[in-house]
Image (spheres, grey):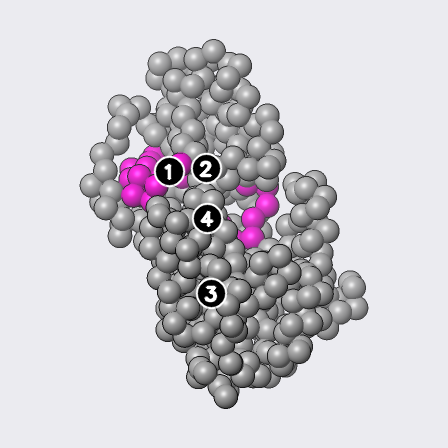
Amino acid sequence: MRESLRPVLIDVTRLVSRSWTRRRSTGIDRVCYAYLRQYRHRALAVVQHRGMIRVLGYRRSDQLFDMLLAPSRGFRAKFAAWFPAAFFGPAPAIDLAGLTYLNVSHTDFDLTEQIDWIERNRLRPVYFVHDLIPILRPDLSRPHAVARHQGRVRRALRHAEVIVVASQVVARDLAAYARSHSLRLPRIVIAPLAGQDLFAQPAGKTAARREDRPHFVCVGTIEPRKNHALLLDVWTELADRLGDDTPVLTIAGQTGPMTGTILDPLRKRAGLSRHVSVRHDCRDAELAGLVANASALLFPSLAEGFGLPLVEGLAAGTPVIASDIPIFREIGQGCAQLIDPGNPAAWRDAICAAAGIPVCHDTRAARADAFAAPSWADHFELVEAAIMPGGLKTASACESSLVA
């Protein structure tokens, strides 16, 4: 007997892990939370653990959703008490056939066990492919991550009923990968991400700049792909030239498995830490104040699947200086100042211009005032038209939405 008429199974494994470890949310995590808020009243929870996949019933799903959407403090104790009965107790009697399995977190859809579970239960799999960076730029990823992402993309292309992407850039990359490997191209939905309303945070409107000097902020996990090394080189040069008048740079980001020696200049270069600070645990309200009051948000990434900080900075009215790469050309709407991420001198001049420091060359100022911020309502309107029962597009209609 079918316990639930909820049409969606939402995989929350990644959010359970994030809450357990209490790490700050990455861009993918934030997308997962947006989907959980959107579907929590229409979905049952899916949790994976050591090769086991469990679908929770109404009550257990709602309990878990409540825990995940609450502040992470106290999550471990609550989850540890809740988990054994929920995961290892009697499974609820649920007829899964025809339900939509929604995995927006890149969680384990490269594994045969998950594909077998989907086919055995006759589910409609929908995957969010955030990017193909490990495949297209393996030099910026660990070998294990490259191999796993190859598996994710191939499995999604072979088995998904719908693949959601956030940009035309990723849609084109996915279509090109499918063609080059003679794989089917399932229905593709291109739905831009909205990010977070920084002004909804307590500090978003009121936080005063804490420095007398111009202040810049860079947001993102500290890893080679984010190109923090370029900014540290620029700030080393500025400190040599300007001394106490050097602008302030705040790097808001967690360390990761590829952080390596990126932050070494702050330890080895005497005095640089007077101008550059690193916030590994920057809460949302603090980050909102930093971005809203910055001379510019800096985003020198070498590769991105989307770029939520760019969208959020422009939506807050903060100038953005970012890398001249295809994804930022698409989502920046011409409102961000885009610079070659391999040209430190151009970055130095743009930063100086934003800080009101004379430079040798003219630079085009970044303008956030013309930016039309995407909305989550628009995102989910596009997604639901394709993934909800009765709302699937034809393959030809979806393919026509791709840019050749």
Mark 4 vs mark 2: in front: 4
Q: Amino acid at mark 3?
A: Ala
Tell me the residue at 62%/81% (across/down): 122
List x then y, in percent, for residue 280.
Answer: 43, 34
List x then y, in percent, for residue 166.
Answer: 52, 61
Kindly identify which residue carries mark 1. Answer: 282
Where disc 3 sits, the SS reads: helix
Q: Amino acid at mark 1?
A: Cys
In which quadrant of the rendered image does the C terminus lie?
A: bottom right
Q: Residues within 10 Å of mark 4 (few under 14, many from 20)?
A: some
Kindly identify which residue carries mark 2. Answer: 253
Marked residue nearer the N-terminal end (2 or 3) = 3
Whether pointer 1 and pointer 4 mark residues with C-beta atoms closer than 8 Å, the reply is no
Q: In this rendering, is residue 110 above or below 337?
A: below
Marked residue nearer the N-terminal end (2 or 1) = 2
For the residues labelled 4 and 3, the Cα–Cα distance comes to 16 Å
List x then y, in percent, for residue 142.
Answer: 68, 42
Q: Residues within 10 Å of mark 1 (few under 14, many from 20)?
A: some
Whether residue 293 appears in magenta in the rendering, the answer is yes
Mark 4 vs mark 3: in front: 3
Tell me the residue at 72%/43% (across/down): 143
Query: What stretch of residues is rendered in magenta?
Result: 281-307
